[in-house]
């Protein structure tokens, strides 16, 4: 059994590393600068290796065991060392500058690519994920990669050069001492392997916990009105406190392993060095080695020891970045919707406003055992005003989601112009529809930006005309800043009726062929409702309109009313026809509402 698990673990580690290297495609466009940085890194690392050799020669030039002193040689070596030092400083500066420039550009591309991909993902992706967690992926996880791209990879390469080059020069200096030193390497490698596994596991856990903590911050700030209204400040403080304590506990566990790792490495490396110096001192006493050679050997050994110890830090950083990379690649591996930028809709993709639902059955991806719609069929003619009514949970909003192709049905087909919805480009379909929801979402910018969201790039006159049609201009012009008034987070500065009218103005500006109104007046006072209803009636003229309503007074004039109950279409007809049906659901709902 153990062999099987070991065999399973190895490919997983290799796969994780391979997945991490996928991110290097973002470095590809800047490969010349990255390659030049690597060249400078190689030169400065090689120059590093010259120091022990030259310092040993400097000591021997002063008069070693088998060498006479030579002041001219001392000055020559001293000047050469100073020259190497200056060159190393220049190359080090250029290398860091190039790596930082490449990293910043690469990570900007990565951030943009992940955001672009995330925003194109289908709705099912967002059903089980929280906003704060996804935000953390773009901020915290990519910040981790920044450190990896800028310093970790460079350090890894530099230390490999020093270890390999140093070992070659050690063998050239003294084979006997090199063999003695190399006997300690297997111990150090076992330590690195053992502790590295734990560091990776806890680093990945810490990343997830940080994402959860960020989610709490984001949710409480977004819902700060509810937090204060329910006097739940201390409840939220406790919730956040618990999560950051978990982050700290995981960080401390990681710290224990990293500390034990570093301590073990120090004992191993310096133990090896003591053994080497002791053996070297005996060789000098026997006349088999010069003091300068021993100095060179000790310096090379310390360089190699420092690099092996440094590899421990690099290894830990790489493990952390692999954890971050896995989270990012999970997002990138999700299949995106085939959306595209729309300027004009091709003639064959233009909607007439005719819609058919043919034997539609549907359940949400997260609730496969719960049928939301069961064999629903209906037709809507162009420019018809159709109302969807029924109790909560009947499937009204799901029909809207299927119209917008946020989801596709498991059975049956949705048709536009008599053609299967899947035969239209997704963006072409959605660009010809507009929705005015019950819970209007406004972006935190200006009124102008929120209305122009219906048609990015619209001029002031177009925005103003849309606001007038939506009965929104009368309150907008009362604001000192007019269209440039900041609406605040989610439109908190505006009343419900004002937010609703801005949403209608947005839909007016889009000029959709199919208009969807989802409980658009349910949460308003009577004065706001009158203004909003008037704006909606103007908006519905000359286009197919689908109205979801609980209050039946708003749908009496509809050309057709579709009554849903428990995911099934139970009645269909005009208001007059439906109220005549004995024992009908619509008649019961109507009597309940209009008897008050």
Image: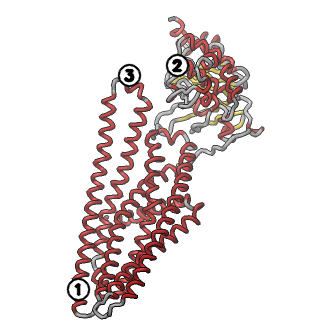
Q: Residues within 10 Å of mark 2 (few under 14, many from 20)?
A: few
Q: Say which label, 2 or 3, has the lower sequence index.
A: 3
Which secondary structure lies at badge 1?
helix
For the residues carrying marks 1 and 2, which lies nearer the camera in this image?
A: 1
Left or right, 207 with reference to 385: left
Callout 3: SS: helix
**The residue positioned farthest toward the right in the image shown:** 347
In the foreground, 169 or 417: 169
Instruction: Give the residue at x 25% y 89%.
Output: 284
- CA gap, disc 2 to disc 3? 17 Å
213 left or right, relative to 402: left
Asked if residue 206 can be seen in this view, the reply is: yes
Q: What residue sits 42% from the left and 61% below the top?
A: 12
Residue 109 coordinates in the image, percent (x, y) = 56, 53
Q: Nearer the viewer, residue 65 or 565?
A: 65
Marks 1/2: CA–CA distance: 86 Å
- Residue lying at 55% horizontally and 29% vertically, measured from the top left: 442
Q: Which is more toward the observer, 60 or 512?
A: 60
The numbered mark at residue 495 is 2
Q: Residues within 10 Å of mark 3 (few under 14, many from 20)?
A: few
* Gap between marks 1 and 3 measured at Cα: 78 Å
**Residue 259 sits above or below residue 436 on the image:** below
- Could you tell which of marks 1 and 2 lies nearer the N-terminus? 1
Residue located at (30% from left, 75% from top): 186
| Residue 77 picture location, percent across and down | 40, 83
The quadrant in which residue 510 appears is top right
Q: Position of residue 183 (x, y in %)?
A: 28, 80
* Residue 482: image location, x then y, percent: 61, 22
Visible residue check, residue 532: no
Residue bearing the label numbered 1: 281
Callout in the foreground (1, 3)? 1
Residue matched to label 3: 229
């Amino acid at each position: 059994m153990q062999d099987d698990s070991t065999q399973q673990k190895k490919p997983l580690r290799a796969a994780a590393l391979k997945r991490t290297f996928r991110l290097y495609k973002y470095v590809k466009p800047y490969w010349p600068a990255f390659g030049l940085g690597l060249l400078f890194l190689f030169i400065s690392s090689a120059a590093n290796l010259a120091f022990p050799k030259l310092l040993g020669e400097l000591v021997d030039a002063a008069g070693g065991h088998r060498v006479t002193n030579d002041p001219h040689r001392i000055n020559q070596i001293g000047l050469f060392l100073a020259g190497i030092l200056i060159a190393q400083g220049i190359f080090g500066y250029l290398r860091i500058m190039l790596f930082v420039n490449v990293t910043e550009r690469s990570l900007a591309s990565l951030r943009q690519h992940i955001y672009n991909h995330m925003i194109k993902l289908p709705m099912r992706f967002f059903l089980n994920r929280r906003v704060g967690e996804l935000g953390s992926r773009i901020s915290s996880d990519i910040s981790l990669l920044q450190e990896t791209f800028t310093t970790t990879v460079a350090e890894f390469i530099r230390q490999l050069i020093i270890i390999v080059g140093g070992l070659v020069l050690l063998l050239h200096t003294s084979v006997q001492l090199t063999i003695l030193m190399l006997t300690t390497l297997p111990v150090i490698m076992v330590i690195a392997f053992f502790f590295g596994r734990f560091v990776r596991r806890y680093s990945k856990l810490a990343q997830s916990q940080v994402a959860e903590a960020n989610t709490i911050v984001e949710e409480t700030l977004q819902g700060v009105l509810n937090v204060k209204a329910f006097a739940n400040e201390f409840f939220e403080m406790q919730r956040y406190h618990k999560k950051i304590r978990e982050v700290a506990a995981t960080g401390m566990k990681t710290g224990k392993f990293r500390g034990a790792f570093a301590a073990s490495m120090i004992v191993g490396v310096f133990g090896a060095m003591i053994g080497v110096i002791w053996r070297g001192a005996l060789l000098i006493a026997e006349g088999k080695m010069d003091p300068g050679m021993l100095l060179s050997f000790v310096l090379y050994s310390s360089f190699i020891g420092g690099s092996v110890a440094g590899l421990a830090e690099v290894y830990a950083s790489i493990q952390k970045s692999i954890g971050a990379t896995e989270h990012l690649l999970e997002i990138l591996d999700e299949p995106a919707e085939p959306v595209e930028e729309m300027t004009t809709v091709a003639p064959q993709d233009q909607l007439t406003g005719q819609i058919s639902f043919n034997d539609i059955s549907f359940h949400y991806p997260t609730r496969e055992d719960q049928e939301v719609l069961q064999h629903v069929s209906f037709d809507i003619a162009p420019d018809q005003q159709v109302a969807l009514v029924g109790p909560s949970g009947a499937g009204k909003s799901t029909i809207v989601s299927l119209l917008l192709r946020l989801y596709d049905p498991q059975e049956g087909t949705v048709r536009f112009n008599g053609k299967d919805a899947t035969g239209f480009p997704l963006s072409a379909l959605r660009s010809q529809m507009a929705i005015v929801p019950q819970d209007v979402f406004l972006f935190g910018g200006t009124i102008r930006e929120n209305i122009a969201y219906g048609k990015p790039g619209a001029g002031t006159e177009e925005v103003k005309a849309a606001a007038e049609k939506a009965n929104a201009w009368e309150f907008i012009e009362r604001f000192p800043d007019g269209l440039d008034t900041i609406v605040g987070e989610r439109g908190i500065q505006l009343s419900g009726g004002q937010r609703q009218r801005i949403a209608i103005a947005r839909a007016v500006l889009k000029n959709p062929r199919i208009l969807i109104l989802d409980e658009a007046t349910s949460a308003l006072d009577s004065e706001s409702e009158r203004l909003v209803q008037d704006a909606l009636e103007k908006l519905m003229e000359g286009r197919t309109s689908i109205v979801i309503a609980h209050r039946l007074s708003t749908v009496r004039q509809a050309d057709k009313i579709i009554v849903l109950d428990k995911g099934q279409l139970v009645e269909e007809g005009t208001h007059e026809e439906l109220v005549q049906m004995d024992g009908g659901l619509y008649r019961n709902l109507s009597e309940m509402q209009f008897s008050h």
